[in-house]
Image: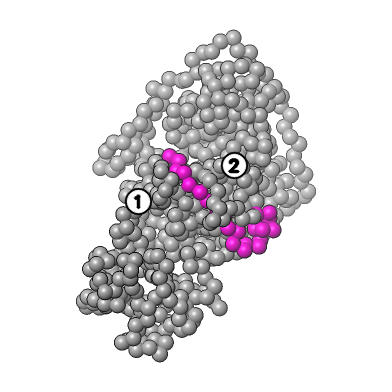
Amino acid sequence: MTKLHYLLLPILMLFSIATVHGADSMDNDGYPEMFIRGAFNGWNAENRYRMTRQGDHYSITLEHLDGEFKVGSSEWNFNYGSASGNILSISSPQTVEATLNGPNFNAQNLSDVTIEFDIRRDDSGHLLNTMISFKTAGESADGTSGTLPVLYINVYNEDGTTLNNEIIDRNLSHKNYFTGSYWLDLNGCEWMAAEGAESLGSEESPLPLQIKARGNFTRLAFSKKPFKLKLDKKQSMLGLSKSKHFALLAHADDNFGYMRNFTGFNLGKRIGLPWTPSQQPVEVIINGNYRGLYFLTESIRIESDRIDIEELDDMETNPELISGGYLVELDNYDEENQIRMPEKSCVGGHYIDALRITWDTPEDYSDVQKQFVTEQFSYMNDYVGECNDKLWSYMDLDDAARYYIVEEIISHTESYHGSTYMFRDRGEGQKWHFSPLWDCGNAFNGSTSDFFYNCDPFGNTWIPSMRVNNKFNDKVKSTWLWFMQNRYEGLVDDINTYCEHISAAAKADRKRWKDAEQPDYAGRMPVVDNSDINSRKQSVLNHLEAKTNWLKSQFGDFNQGYFSEPERDDTPAAPLPAYSGVSDVLYDNNDLPEEYFNLQGLRIMNPTKGEIYILRKGNSSSKIIK
């Protein structure tokens, strides 16, 4: 049987229980009795059929449903008014709104259908709204697609006794941790079980965790928010590397069928970057509320199964240890845990931004650690600005080329502008590596007949200057020819399989969020429609085909001849410094330009009078009205 699922949400209640349901229609627990009636199933409009209740949940199953029916209490005290606005068709998937002042529903040829009616309450027990849903045999009663694993999370108040729905509030204003528990149900997902995934915990025996919101714009602008998970102990969730730390990425802004990160990460693994995160699709329910399709993703961590380098302690002062390991982000926000300096450039025609090195690991730097990282990036910054091959004594040339090729193939306009990570291991002979890939949120936004850094308003740290370095370009071209001939093939098959796996869940996600209330945030965005995965997939495939064909004309035709993997660059690493003291490591930022940003964080070159912007000058920023 073809699965149909019709969700009508929210149907706002404009009255209290006492008003709608008289005392004689309450059961002994104070709950209203709910009935349906209608001219269908051989019934006539005078008959009522009582719904089964479990708590605030009511349901009834019919062998066949075709025609108009009504849902309400035994009193049937409805004010129908002009009625035309109360006739709701459920003949195709949609989400509609109406008051409960007499909704008439018209169903068309549904067999073996269950009608479910849920009353929603606030923490004090007062009615908030109601939800009516329709599902045919075999469909999930909780809104999930039934095709993917389900991650159940319950979040509690500080006293640990009651659920705390602040975590799913559309206006969640902070990124503080909440305490909760979880269980992960593999839900019969055979393809994921074949990859080593297993269920974890259960409803009866959940496992402890902490959860908090993550992200900036994606957290503020969407009701469907991304989260960070911290488990009580290391787990291999859905076959991912064993760790306490995972991200639940919502991709609420991904209008390419949730394929931006998937495609970028897939290419990163294929081209052989040192480490690229893995992810698995999962449906999420928090405090009993279906939150849609998410992507459980390995967080960026210095760990043996992730970024496998020496871990460096916070506030380390021993000069013999402070050469590594470091994980930093080239950032687009001013942060406290950050080293800043003017970006050097050897080309014109591109926005020159401040160079912001945000330290990720260790989390706290001693003065000598700040000095080491500052000096390392000062040298690289100078050599980029001079187009000097001495750069490759500090930066790994091979990983720089591979990282760039991935970002160019997916036309990722925001790459090298925040969420750009570099790491360095400890000791002599080590260099800085571009890796891991993260947040391909603006992939496929660039032109298929130009380089991505010519297609955006962002500052793309260093890469326009690196692209005029002959040694870098030679490495890019030789790596491109080898990669496209030997490692790229299979990407399309992976995309097709991935889309098959998430197609049903993408439709369930769309039903969940289509008309949901959005945050009270000036920069909020409409929820994108990924319900037609095949059309979104075709857009991705068309972009990849067009872009790789154009890049042939820039980097070489990989179909002409045989190309082996290039030898690794043998430029010796710069010697480590010998510190006799610690100098002032922070640059004076007063010479940085005045910059304007909109509330989405995009730089605005020509501010418009009357609009609201963020003004940044040097180390300071403030919201202004221009």
Residue type (three-letter) at the residue carrying disc 1? Pro
Q: Can I make out residue 615 in this image?
A: yes
The picture quadrant where one finds residue 31 is: bottom left
Type of amino acid at the residue the image marks with label 2: Lys
Instruction: In the rendered structure, find residue 624 and report the number of the disc placed on it.
Output: none
Instruction: Using a 10 Å C-alpha cutoff, classify the residue at mark 1 as few (fewer than 14 neighbours), some (14 to 19) or many (20 or more).
Output: some
Per the image, label 1 sits on a secondary structure element best described as loop
Residue for point 45% across, 81% down: 62
Q: Return the residue at label 2.
A: 233
Residue matched to label 1: 519
* Foreground residue among 250 and 169: 169
Is residue 74 depicted above or below 399 in this figure?
A: below
- The magenta segment is 176-197
Quarter of the rendering occupied by the C terminus:
top left
- Give the quarter of the image for residue 604: top left
Image vertical order of residue 144 relative to residue 591, above or below? below
The reply, left or right, for residue 525 in relation to residue 200 is left
Please give left or right for residue 532 compared with residue 38 in the image. Answer: right
Residue 569 rendering spot, x and y as whole percentages:
72, 32
Which residue occupies the foreground of this view, 60 or 610? 60
